[in-house]
Image (spheres, grey):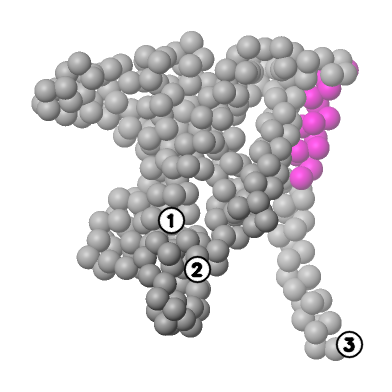
Amino acid sequence: MTSTGRARGFIAIALLPALLLFLFFVIVPIFWSAYYGFFDWKGIGSAKFIGFGNYAEVIHDPVFWRSFKNNMLIVAASVFGQVPIALVLALLLLRNAWIHKFIRTSVFMPMVLSSVVVGIIWGYIYHPEIGILNFLLDRLGLASWKRQWLSDPSVSMYSLMVPIIWNYIGPYLILFLAALQNIPSEMDDAAKIDGAQGSRKLFSITLPLIWDTIKVAVVLCISGSLKAFDLIYIMTGGGPAHSTELLASYMYNNTFSIYRFGYGSAVSTTIILISLVLIAGSQYLMKRDNR
C-alpha cells in the first residue's frame, strides 16, 4: 500500500467514530421523526397510522404560518445582521488595535454565557418598569417611545431580534477572522502595487477570497435561525398571542405541552424541509456566476 493509501485509510479510521455518532444521534433521529409524523401518537401507548394527516394539519394551521413568518424575520435579521456585523468587526480587528479589547469583550461575552442567562438579562433590559431601556428613553426626553417591549405584539418580535443578533455574532467573527488571516500577504503587496486600496480592495480582492467562508456563515445562520428556541422560550414563551412564536417553539409546545408527539414529529420534519430549501436557495443565489 502506498503512503497516500495509508494516509487515506488512517483518516477514514479516525473519522469513523465521529461519523457513527453523527449517524446515530442526528441522521437516524431525523428519519425516525419523519416516520412518526405519519402517526397519531402521544408518546406512550400505541401509535395510530393516519398517513399525511399531521402534515395536512400543519399546512392548514394559522399558528404554524404565523411562526413561519416570525422565523423568516429571524432568518433575515441573522443573515443581514449577524454576518455583515461580524465581517465589519473582523476587518476592524485586523486594522485597529486600540479597539480590540472593547470588541472582544462586547462580542465574545455572549459566547461564555448560557442562552438562558442572556435571555434573562435582556428580559430585564426590556422590562417596562425597571428596565434600563425605558429608563434611558425617559431620561433622554423620549418618553413617548417607551413600550411594553415584550408584551406589545406590534414590537415584541422586533425586540427579540436585537438579543438574537448580539448573541451569535461571536462565532461568525471567529470564522471571518480566520479567513482574513489566511489571505496570502502577497495579495496585499500586489494590491498596493496596482493601487487598489480601501473599498476597491475590499470588493475586488478581500471579499472574493473569503466568499466561500461567507457562504458557510450564511448556511449556519439559516440553520441556526430555524432552530432558534431557547432565547424566545425564556423571554416570551412564544407570546403574547403567538406574536413571537417560532417554528421550534411551535413544535415544542405541540409535542411536550399537549403531548402530540406524532404532530410534533411532522412539524420537525417540515422545519428540516424548509431549512433545506432556504439553504439551497441561498447557495444558488450566492454562486459566483450569479453575483
Label ID, residue 1: 3
Q: Position of residue 273 (x, y in %)?
A: 73, 34
As shown in the figure, which amino acid type bears the numbered disc 2?
Answer: Ile
The residue mark sitting in front, 1 or 3, is 1
Mark 2 or 3, nearer chain start: 3
The residue mark sitting in front, 2 or 3, is 2
As shown in the figure, which amino acid type bears the numbered disc 3?
Answer: Met
Q: Report helix, strand or loop for mark 1.
A: helix
Task: Judge whether 220 appears above or below 42 on screen.
Answer: below
The region drawn magenta spans 27-49
Q: Report helix, strand or loop for mark 3.
A: loop
Q: Position of residue 222 (x, y in %)?
A: 59, 41
Task: Judge whether 109 appears above or below 191 on screen.
Answer: above
Mark 1 or 3, nearer chain start: 3
10 Å neighbourhood of mark 3: few (<14), some, or many (≥20)? few
User: Circle 1 is placed at which residue position?
Assistant: 87
User: Circle 2 is placed at which residue position?
Assistant: 205
Residue 48 included in the magenta stretch of the image: yes
As shown in the figure, which amino acid type bears the numbered disc 1?
Answer: Leu
Are the residues tagged 2 and 3 within 8 Å (C-beta)?
no
